[in-house]
Amino acid sequence: MEKSTNQQSRRSFLKVTSLTGGGMMIGFSWLANLVPNEALATAANANDWVELTGFIKITPDNQVKIFNPNPEFGTNVMTSLPMMVNEELQADWSKVIVEMGDYDTPRFKSQFTGGSRGMAQGWKPLRTAGATARMMLMQAAANEWNVPVAELTVANGVVSHKASNRSANFGALATAASKLTAPTNVELKKNSAFSLIGTPQKNKVGKDIVAGHSLFTMDYKHEGMLIAMAIHPPAFGMTLKSFDATEALKMPGIKSVFDIQVYKDGYKRAGFDTRAFNKLVVVVGNSTWEVMNARKKVNVQWIPTETTKEIVAAWGGQREEIVPAGLESTDEHMKQMYAMQQKPAKLLRKDGDPETAFSKAAKVIERTYSAPFLSHNPMEPISCFAHITDEKAYFVAPIQIPEMMKQNIVSNLGIPGDKIEMKLTRMGGGFGRRAYGHYIVEAGLISQKIKAPVKLIYTREDDMTNGIYRPTYMVTYKAAIDSNNNVTAISIKGGGIPEGAVHENRFPAGAFENYIAEGWEIPSNITIGAFRAPGSNFIASAEQSFLDELAETIGKDPLDYRLELLRKAKANPVGKRNDYDADRYIAVLELVKEKSNWAARPKNARRGVAAYFCHSSYAAHVVDVTMKDGQPVIDKVISAIDCGVIVNPEGAVNMVEGAVVDGIGNALYGGMRIEKGVPMQKNLNQYRIIRHKEAPKKIEVHFVQNNFDPTGLGEPPFPPVFGALANALYKATGKRLYNQPYLNELNKS
Amino acid sequence: MSKFNLKVNGKNHEVDVDPTTPVLWVLRDHLNLIGTKYGCGVGSCGACTIHLNGRALKSCQLPVSAVGTQPITTIEGVVAEVGEMHPVQKAWLELDVAQCGYCQTGQIMAAVSLLKTKPHPTEEEIESAMSGNICRCGTYVRIKAAIQQAAKSSTK
């Protein structure tokens, strides 16, 4: 019988280091956790790796490693970003090891997973890094063989000189290459010469994922590590008064119970420093289950908060944010938002004379749309490992935007920036939630307090009731129609709690002579944050539903009407600034029209269309739906996407499919209700997430082929799913849907 | 605290834990088998799916005291069972199923169990059997295709 605490040891990546006084030091090697197993079997001693640029390391025995700068939460950056490097480096891709880079933004220039920026941001620097390293390897060969660089060729990690029949692999050249000065003006391949970019490549981490290897922070272990959980107020608008831990401390395995203040008084929050609750009660113990049980025994007293002001110093400015007191409720929010729609709001844009057009209209259609708070619910709940010692502040963290964590850690932990070391793990989803790294500070404070390595774990309930939701929104679209069925003016007015989402310069701005956009916001103590395509996911649903209804009202085909408006905006754009490229918008609509055989669809087809542009990529979907026993069945979704050059088609198609499924799920089921400050959905048995049997039976993804620099796919395909679904459900049921989640409205008689 | 003898992936283990401890946390915290994931703790997401007596089960809902002599298989044991990558894992790789990957070990455990009882499931049977496993990234279409492919490959 084996009494096992390191059952994994055979393949658990134990790193053995000789100590000078004899003996060995054993610890988990994080590096090893992140590389594929078969590569690990031959992985060289860390000292053997020769670095070429910050992104590439090569061993003398010819192992090639490419570092991915941006934390991976499922958008394929661990594969597609290294592909960019290797397109120019030209190592043997099948043998390239990819590794997640540590937190080291000066080295990687940027470490930001969010806003669908990875592809665009990496495009030039990553290819340049690959080309620079290749040039250095070629120069090393040229020096050694005494031949001109121009006579050398490179393929599959081998530099060759045909005339003299000599060749050497990268490993043999790496040491000499690393001593050369890096060239500063390398030439990059033309797109037509790409041999790796544009070819479907499997996920480089796929084997570790299906084998269940340690990839996530939740899985991380460390000698002497304790487990911590935090208790936060049960309601927004409440804060800690006092606690009694007498009973909890009697529980087995419990080490300590104390309170922490996350951000210091007067801390100027940066853009991603949102946190819902500043004072937490922390329970620390030996194991997860023991801590889970003990936390129930802590007797905590909560008191209402007072209205406070927080300073937010972000996005190049500084502002005061009012955090109101009070226990808020969803029903009250809806009333407040309807009330705001009746009042004057902030004018965002006005073209022509919409007032006159509305007053002269033969017909006005006005439709109001709303959507609830959404909880991100990444599959891996929030966690963070911290070990703060005098020498360094060591973290293992799942964080989307490491480059913006420094100030927060430095200010609130009182640690100099150069003492921060952070390993960045794969994240079990993020969707924006893990842009907000308050939990890193929390884990650090706990480790400081107990002077021990600690992993902070949020339960699903902790995570779901911790705010940073997608805001709740309302918007009203209005169209003035003359007696000839021409649309003469458009009005958009809307806002949200605590942040609105009217984008005055987006389509259909530019397509109407008379146009007005207005916005408002209602302060709240419920915290919000970026949620997949922030600012776009709701407004797209409203806009695309309204355009559909408008087209029907004036007797036009909904897809052709969109094309007509875009062609008009292209030929004679109204206004000074319109934030879209009409040609690219048209291209995705034309493509989805063709691929869905739209023009030939039967009159009663239960089919809807929508398109949207955000985060630099264009997306259009056609959704086919049938109703079965009162439940929508999504028969098929056809998607057309323009994200410029498609770096890894395998990952790109997967991303679009995922966005379609996620969009359908959130549109039909998503929603967090708040009652008297309390989040009413606390776990996945109460918060509905789309499941297998509710997913589309088929998803077909098509790309517009062009040579634009690549843009992202994490977000852009998501927003138009909602509208396409609503429009399809209208055709299937005769019911226009205005309030999300749609299933609730669909089932109302 | 009580001592329990567990048979996990063909090996016997002794653990000394509170009898109410869910098998999920025994595996993760005490046996260091971290391929079984925590997602919700209420049996709603399937990230913690294991096999008990060869049948898929959510380990967050199974107290260690209820296991007795029944054998447990985790994702780590699925590889060991067939001596290499399981056909289901292979299909997962061939169809490049994963996005974030966190739920996928649970999905694979559910799929392996399904194919044991129904070697050639219909689409509806797959959807129904797999609906206890949430994939927040929405890889359902690929999961279904991978199960179909694994079913096909096992008859070759």
Image (spheres, coloured by chain):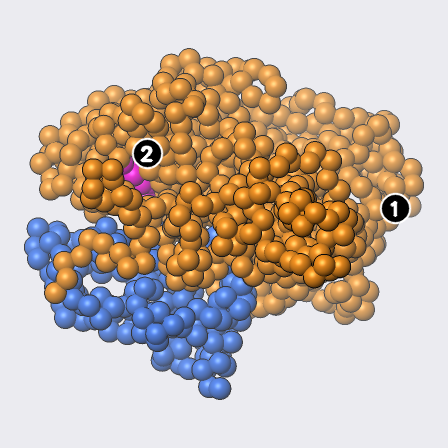
Chain colours: A orange, B blue
Q: Amino acid at mark 2?
A: Ala
* In this picture, residue A609 sits left or right of residue A359: left
Asked if A657 appears above or below B11 in the picture, the reply is above
Q: Position of residue A460 (x, y in %)?
A: 35, 45
Q: Position of residue A240 (x, y in %)?
A: 28, 24
Q: Residue at x 33, y 52 (%)?
A: A13
The residue lying toward the viewer, choosing from A19 and A425, is A19
* In this picture, residue A455 sits left or right of residue A364: left
In the picture, residue A608 is in which quadrant?
A: bottom right
Q: Amino acid at mark 1?
A: Arg
Name the magenta segment's main secondary structure: strand
Asked if A500 appears above or below A592 in the picture, the reply is above
Quadrant for the N terminus of chain A in the image? bottom left
Q: Which residues are magenta?
A: A454-459
Verify whether residue A732 appears in magenta.
no
State the residue lying farthest toward the bottom: B156
Q: Residue at x 86, y 40 (%)?
A: A569
In the picture, residue A734 is in which quadrant?
A: bottom right
* In this picture, residue A669 sits left or right of residue A306: right
Asked if A516 appears above or below B125 in the picture, the reply is above
Q: Which mark is residue A363?
A: none
Q: Secondary structure at mark 1?
A: helix
Task: Check whether the beta carbons of the residues at disc 1 and disc 2 lie within 8 A of each other.
Answer: no
Q: Label 1: which residue?
A: A567
Q: Which mark is residue A386?
A: 2
- Of all chains, the one bearing label 2 is A
Q: Residue at x 27, y 30 (%)?
A: A447
